[in-house]
Amino acid sequence: MMGFLLSSNNFVFILFFVTCKFGESQKSCPGSPALKNAKCAMTVSFPYSSCESVRAEILDRMNGVNEWEDPHNKGKYALIQSSSSNDDADGLLFTIEGSRVTGDGKYKDLFGFEMKDNTQENVTGCDLSACSESQVFSILDFSTNYCNLRSLYCNASDDNCPIVNSNLGYEETYVKCNQRDVKKCTSPKDAA
């Protein structure tokens, strides 16, 4: 953390620049042109699914495979880019960047996923960093950024979410995701 002290005409301004670490990388946070915006940043662990299967499920849902629809007010997802790389030290790394337009077509959010396989005791799991950010000035989002992410991996058995191929088991850890009401992610009556 760095700070500066500025003074002018009996006013004192203190500016702080804070660097924070999001999971292992901040690449999943897309940023926003808004001065203040709502966002959800978290990590998600899939202990019994490889990142290849997690990535496939996310991309299939984004593309509406098997007529999959966003359970959070039928928003529309679009893929910006998806890539994979293999670093001998870090292993296989997958990234996904996308957008979601609210069901009413008024607002667009950007999001990103970064995932890496995690093998323990001969079981391959997946560790994922996820972040969704509003692109307009916003303080409250009524869990929209959380739902933007969660809707792409939630499961049928625990969450009653529509799936395409894989019923993924997962555990979420919140980095900066203050509004995260699970009920809003599947209710068509809630705000987009």
Image (cartoon, rainbow, N blue to C red):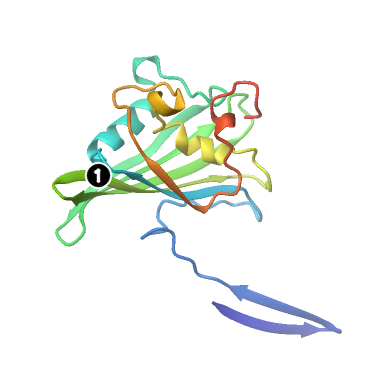
**Residue 156 to residue 81: above or below:** above
Instruction: Find disc 1 in the rendering and name its residue.
Output: 125
Number of numbered markers: 1
| Identity of the residue drawn at 43% across and 39% down | 98
Residue furthest top as drawn = 67
Q: Nearer the viewer, residue 45 or 140?
A: 45
**Is 14 left, or right, of 56 in this rendering?**
right
| Identity of the residue drawn at 61% across and 48% down | 38
Residue furthest right as drawn = 10
Q: Nearer the viewer, residue 76 or 122?
A: 122
From the top left corner, tell me how far across and down residue 52 is, in percent.
23, 38
| Identity of the residue drawn at 29% across and 23% down | 165
**Is 8 left, or right, of 19 in this rendering?**
right
**Residue 171 to residue 88: above or below:** above
From the top left corner, tell me how far across and down residue 118 is, in percent.
23, 50
- Name the kind of residue labelled 1 in the image: Gly
Q: Nearer the viewer, residue 45 or 13?
A: 45
**Is 185 left, or right, of 56 in this rendering?**
right
Q: Nearer the viewer, residue 22 or 158?
A: 158
SS category of the residue bearing label 1: strand
Position of the C terminus, as image quadrant, is: top right
| Identity of the residue drawn at 60% across and 26% down | 105
Position of the N terminus, as image quadrant, is: bottom right
Give the crowd class for mark 1: few <14, some 14-19, many >=20 residues within 10 Å: many
From the top left corner, tell me how far across and down residue 79 is, in percent.
39, 34
